[in-house]
Image (spheres, grey):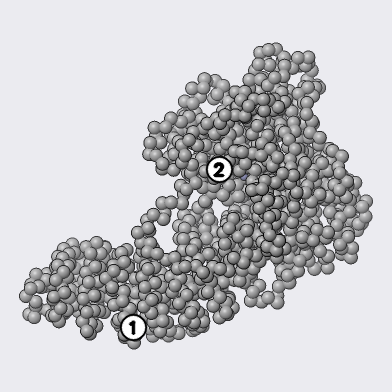
């Protein structure tokens, strides 16, 4: 610390007060200052005031003696601020101290030879207080201090003592983007590259500050471009390598990190990425990172390098001829403006896999504006954008229904409302004649199959006659190959290696465990199922059935470094291209022969069965495969669901599978979810189960570019990879992998058929065909209630007047969990329990268990054969294109017209990004409350009945979480079943029930992945909850019910607003992706870091946290206040 020089006897007369104060201060320096900070603050405050008033006159007073005084004051200030830590700096800044310092700086600079010592002190002080002053950057620019500092550095490059504080100030200035641009124009970049030097023990602190300042400067794209054009990218790489090699004791990792920060910012522009690749940056960073891997403390360097490498990884095209689905379904009616017409109207020769327009990115203008005044506005937007704010749309309004004449045809689906049961013998409980009288429409389940549905020969016989024959053959529709056998001891591979059609395969005897499963019946059902590719094979898991394992499967704990090692393996493809096999082993785009001849060295893939959707498999390394999923039919995207078969595996070898064309930006695969595997050998051995399987699971953005044709015009987007590893435990096994427990349309038909067969006589069950789908499959509609006690008018009256409950499921084919919940509901409803009997006596259930059979059959994830999301068609469904929605809505319109609107409407869905089971409902009040459009939401009277059912569910269903529920009406959801049934049909309790595909983070199942047992239980608990709701409605009048429900609900507390019904913005969405999209990077990292800190204590994915944390803070070794 410099000793303050007192200008005692030479004191300036006009500054006598300053003199007095300084003398006082001098007495206080040292220990007394610490003891009496209050006093010191008072004195300095007075001093400041004097300086400020003097500053106003300082244009005239420019004598050497003034400089001496100022120097003295600066020294005192410096000591005071050093001792007083942050609080005093704060006081200094709040009193306008920085402005004074800048003014002195400007004035001093007017001298022909600015006093070096003064400049040194001024910059030291500014470096100290600058970071606390958010506006320093702007002030410095407006006063012209930027140029004073930069010119000073330029003139004194060798003067380390002076340059160091100047660089520190420059670093603070550069945090402001506009300043960074201005400094760049003044030659700051070239200047910095004169200061930043190869490894040296001597000036490390100077280099560190210089690198930091450079990182800040390079956030500007103009500066990044200047750097590239100045040829500095190879310089940066050489510098990094030099420090990497010489800093053997890792004492200067901060500098190394800073150099990577420079590279990171430079590679934010395409020009920079090109220069980086040209300078062999990939190899340099790959090799240096590999050398760092063994030292855990160097992780930030590895992560930073990995981020840069991922960004610079050349974008590849997906190895496909087109991203349009491998199958096209010719629609009879195609709307000219519809998605299918658009999809197939591209001019010939348009390559939709690669997007040329992405190359024009460099024409970007430098969009850096002075955004200082907007800084606070950014955060306020975002969340509320999607909330419906139009009050007219928020008030539930029964839109004038269609004329009754039009709806009258739907009367036939409500026979129970008019039937009088005359001539029916209620005494006899042994026959099921009741069903016959109430069952005018029978689903033609076991139709005679069309010839192309029963082709017996497998395509592989044609393609691959020389291949070694696996013991297990694909299961063909001609089920004569199979015979049920109780003998489970004999392994299939011990059987004679019989390959003929007559090979006998043992099947597990699951009749006890799966009362609704019947193998022969299943095959019969499949014969009646019409798929677009005319599938002739049956997947074993659907044939044998699935028995839920008796144990619970915990969420997979994510190991440290999983993502990083996968990414490094991906980068190796580029570094060591000769190691890559690139051997296509399965390809649906060769329709005659998708299974490509196996030489025994590769796995065999297949997914030509109901709900299967693998399009291509490419062997990358000996035990690693890239897999590509097929798009939804008549679409070019929607990849998430998967279901495929693997055989020809080696026992005990770990295979890696990468699904490389996933689209969602995050996945529960990053948070403990495992894919499902079904082993046929296990099934034969008596364990026919889908089990959670796979290790090293992660989901991350990859280097395959998405065409803007498939992203709705967005450019520069990438696909995501879902990667997992697994080993197989049986030789000659056939294994299946799936995103979630499959549930085919044929399974539904089998289950319905068995439920009907097992129906007790007191149950009224009717199965109607609501309509035919586009693909020619029937859409079943079920009616379930109790038979009337007798045909007395009282009993018939009670029977007819039961309130209606309307349920539907599986509008989204990839959400198979919805079907399992529905299975649970149906089984409970049809079950023998007293609760179920009471429930049936209380309500009439109308159930459409599968709103999108075609999507399910053809392995779609989201759409129907019209290439559209059916749950966005409810406002105006087209009878030709969306028949199931059109007719389901018509049923509800008919009910509304006859004053029989259901008490509860619920559409079962699956949720891919959240845990637990929860509901979305519709509340006017909550929507207004969340949207902030009116502070008067307290004045709105709203019946809280909509909260009762979810509240009951949260009390009785372990998987259900009230905290995840939302009752906000979103604009993007205005054409979903939930909102339309609420608004147009006037059903207050209109819900979407979302079940996780992953697991639970609360309740009894906390920490476990969800299984079919839990999903089915959820479906049953939904019924129980309806009974509780009934108890409340049954005892009390309607008004009382409201009071009661209000009591039950407790005080009205709005739930959290969730952005997207199916993909809400989720706190877990931490950064795991290398954004190459320039604009997004900073924002993403910031949000990710915020999210990361929020999820730290849940223990989820620490590696990801480190990723984002490092990215955010790595480049700021000292607190630098950003004004962006
Ligand atoms: Zn859904």
Position of residue 869 relative to residue 400, above or below, is below
Q: Quarter of the image holding residue 840?
A: top right
Position of residue 520 relative to residue 166, above or below, is above
335 sits to left or right of 952: right
Mark 2 Cα shell of 10 Å, populated few (<14), some (14-19), many (≥20): many
177 sits to left or right of 43: right
Disc 2 marks which residue?
973
* Count of marks, rendered view: 2
- Of residues 951 and 232, the one drawn nearer to the viewer in this rendering: 232
Q: Which mark is residue 154?
A: 1
Q: Which mark is residue 831?
A: none
1062 sits to left or right of 411: left
- Of residues 876 and 855, the one drawn nearer to the viewer in this rendering: 876
Tell me the residue at 41%/41% (across/down). Answer: 933
Which quadrant is the C terminus positioned in? Answer: bottom left
- Of residues 825 and 460, the one drawn nearer to the viewer in this rendering: 460
Residue 774, image x and y in percent?
74, 42
Which quadrant is the N terminus positioned in? Answer: bottom left
Tell me the residue at 79%/33% (across/down). Answer: 443
Residue 723, image x and y in percent?
65, 61
Under circle 2, the secondary element is: helix
Position of residue 157 relative to residue 33, above or below, is below
Instruction: Answer whether labels 1 and 2 touch (C-beta < 8 Å).
Output: no
Residue 727, image x and y in percent?
72, 61
Position of residue 322 relative to residue 79, above or below, is above
- Of residues 58 and 1100, the one drawn nearer to the viewer in this rendering: 58
Q: Quadrant of ligand 1?
A: top right
Q: Quarter of the image holding residue 696?
A: bottom right
Tell me the residue at 15%/73% (across/down). Answer: 58
């Amino acid at each position: 610390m410099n000793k303050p020089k007192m200008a005692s006897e030479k004191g300036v007369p006009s500054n006598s007060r300053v003199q007095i104060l300084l003398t006082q201060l001098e007495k206080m320096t040292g220990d007394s200052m610490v003891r009496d900070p209050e006093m010191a603050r008072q004195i300095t405050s007075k001093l400041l005031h004097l300086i400020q008033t003097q500053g106003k006159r300082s244009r005239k007073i420019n004598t050497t003696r003034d400089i001496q005084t100022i120097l003295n004051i600066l020294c005192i200030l410096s000591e005071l601020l050093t001792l007083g830590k942050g609080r005093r700096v704060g006081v200094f800044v709040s009193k306008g101290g920085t402005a004074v310092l800048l003014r002195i700086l400007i004035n001093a600079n007017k001298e022909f030879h600015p006093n070096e010592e003064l400049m040194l002190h001024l910059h030291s002080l500014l470096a100290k207080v600058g970071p606390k002053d958010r506006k320093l950057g702007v002030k410095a620019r407006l006063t012209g201090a930027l140029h004073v500092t930069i010119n000073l550095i330029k003139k004194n490059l060798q003067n380390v003592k002076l340059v160091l504080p100047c660089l520190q100030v420059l670093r603070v200035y550069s945090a402001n983007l506009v300043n960074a641009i201005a400094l760049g124009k003044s030659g700051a970049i070239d200047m910095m590259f004169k200061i930043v030097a190869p490894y040296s023990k001597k000036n490390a602190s100077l280099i560190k500050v210089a690198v930091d300042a450079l990182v800040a400067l390079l956030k500007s794209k103009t500066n990044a471009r200047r750097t590239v054009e100045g040829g500095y990218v190879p310089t940066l790489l050489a510098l990094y390598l030099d420090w990497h090699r010489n800093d053997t004791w890792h004492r200067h990792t901060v500098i190394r990190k800073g150099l990577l920060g420079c590279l990171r910012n430079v590679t934010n522009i395409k020009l920079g990425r090109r220069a980086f690749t040209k300078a062999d940056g990939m190899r340099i960073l790959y090799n240096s990172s590999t050398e760092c891997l063994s030292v855990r403390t160097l992780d930030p360097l590895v992560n930073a390098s990995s981020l840069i490498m991922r960004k610079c990884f050349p974008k590849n095209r997906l190895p496909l001829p087109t991203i349009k689905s491998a199958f096209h379904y010719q629609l009879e009616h195609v709307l000219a403006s519809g998605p299918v017409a658009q999809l197939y109207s591209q001019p010939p020769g348009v390559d939709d896999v690669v997007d040329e327009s992405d190359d024009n990115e460099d024409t970007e203008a430098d969009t850096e504006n002075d955004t200082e005044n907007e800084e606070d506005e950014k955060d306020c937007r975002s969340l509320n954008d999607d909330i419906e704010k139009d009050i007219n749309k928020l008030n539930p309004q029964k839109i004038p229904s269609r004329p009754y004449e039009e709806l009258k045809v739907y009367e036939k689906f409500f026979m129970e409302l008019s039937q009088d049961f005359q001539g029916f013998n209620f005494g006899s409980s042994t026959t099921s004649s009741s069903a016959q009288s109430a069952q005018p429409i029978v689903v033609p389940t076991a139709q005679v199959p069309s010839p192309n549905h029963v082709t017996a020969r497998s395509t592989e016989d044609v393609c691959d006659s020389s291949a070694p024959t696996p013991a297990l053959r694909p299961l063909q529709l001609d089920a004569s190959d199979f015979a049920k056998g109780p003998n489970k001891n004999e392994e299939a591979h011990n059987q004679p290696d019989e390959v003929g059609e007559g090979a006998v395969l043992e099947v597990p005897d699951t009749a006890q465990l799966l009362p609704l499963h019947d193998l022969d019946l299943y095959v019969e059902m499949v014969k009646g199922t019409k798929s677009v590719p005319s599938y002739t094979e049956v997947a074993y898991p659907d044939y044998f059935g699935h028995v839920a394992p008796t144990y619970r499967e915990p969420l997979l704990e994510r190991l440290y470094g999983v993502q990083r090692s996968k990414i490094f393996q991906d980068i190796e493809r580029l570094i060591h291209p000769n190691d890559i096999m690139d051997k296509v082993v399965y390809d649906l785009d060769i329709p005659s022969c998708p299974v490509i001849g196996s030489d025994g060295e590769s796995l065999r893939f297949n997914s030509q069965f109901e709900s299967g959707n693998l399009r291509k498999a490419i062997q990358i390394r000996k035990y690693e495969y890239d897999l590509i999923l097929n798009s939804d039919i008549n679409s070019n995207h929607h990849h998430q669901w998967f279901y495929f078969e693997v055989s020809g595996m080696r026992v005990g070898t770990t295979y890696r599978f990468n699904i490389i064309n996933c689209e969602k930006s995050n996945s529960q695969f990053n948070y403990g979810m495992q894919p499902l595997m079904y082993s046929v050998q296990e099934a034969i051995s008596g364990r026919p189960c889908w089990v959670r399987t796979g290790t090293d699971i992660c989901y991350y953005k990859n280097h395959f570019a998405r065409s803007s044709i498939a992203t709705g015009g967005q450019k520069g987007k990438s696909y995501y990879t879902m990667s997992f590893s697994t080993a197989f435990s049986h030789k000659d096994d056939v294994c299946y992998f799936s995103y979630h427990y499959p549930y085919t349309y044929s399974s539904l038909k089998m289950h319905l058929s068995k439920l009907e067969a097992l129906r007790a006589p007191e149950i009224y069950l009717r199965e109607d065909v609501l309509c035919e789908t586009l693909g020619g499959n029937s859409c079943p509609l079920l009616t379930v209630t109790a038979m009337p006690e007798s045909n007395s008018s009282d009993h018939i009256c009670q029977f007819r007047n039961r309130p209606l409950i309307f349920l539907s499921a599986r509008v989204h084919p990839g959400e198979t969990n919805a079907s399992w919940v529905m299975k649970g509901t149906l089984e409970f409803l049809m079950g023998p329990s007293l609760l179920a009997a009471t429930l049936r006596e209380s309500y009439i259930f109308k159930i459409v268990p599968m709103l999108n059979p075609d999507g399910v059959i053809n392995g779609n994830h989201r759409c129907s054969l019209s290439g559209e999301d059916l749950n966005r068609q409810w406002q105006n469904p087209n009878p030709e294109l969306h028949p199931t929605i059109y007719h389901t809505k018509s049923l509800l319109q008919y009910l509304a017209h006859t004053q029989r609107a259901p008490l509860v409407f619920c559409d079962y869905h699956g949720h891919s990004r959240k845990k637990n089971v929860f509901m979305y409902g519709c509340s006017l009040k909550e929507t207004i409350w969340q949207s902030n459009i009116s502070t008067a939401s307290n004045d709105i009277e709203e019946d809280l009945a909509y909260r009762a059912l979810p509240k009951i569910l949260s009390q009785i269903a372990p998987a259900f979480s009230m905290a995840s529920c939302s009752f906000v009406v979103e604009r993007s959801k205005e054409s979903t079943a939930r909102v339309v049934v609420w608004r147009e049909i006037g059903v207050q309790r209109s819900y979407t029930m979302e079940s996780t595909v992953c697991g639970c983070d609360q309740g009894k199942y906390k920490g476990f992945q969800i299984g079919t047992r839990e999903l089915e239980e959820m479906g049953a608990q939904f019924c129980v909850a309806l009974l509780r709701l009934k108890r409340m409605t049954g005892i009390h009048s309607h008004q009382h019910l409201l009071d009661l429900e209000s009591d039950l609900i407790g005080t009205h507390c709005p739930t959290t607003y969730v952005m997207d019904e199916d993909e809400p913005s989720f706190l877990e969405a931490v950064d795991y992706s290398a954004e190459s999209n320039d604009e997004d990077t900073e924002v993403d990292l910031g949000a990710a870091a915020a999210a990361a800190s929020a999820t730290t204590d849940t223990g989820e994915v620490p590696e990801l946290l480190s990723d984002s944390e490092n990215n955010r803070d790595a480049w700021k070794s000292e607190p630098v206040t950003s004004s962006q």
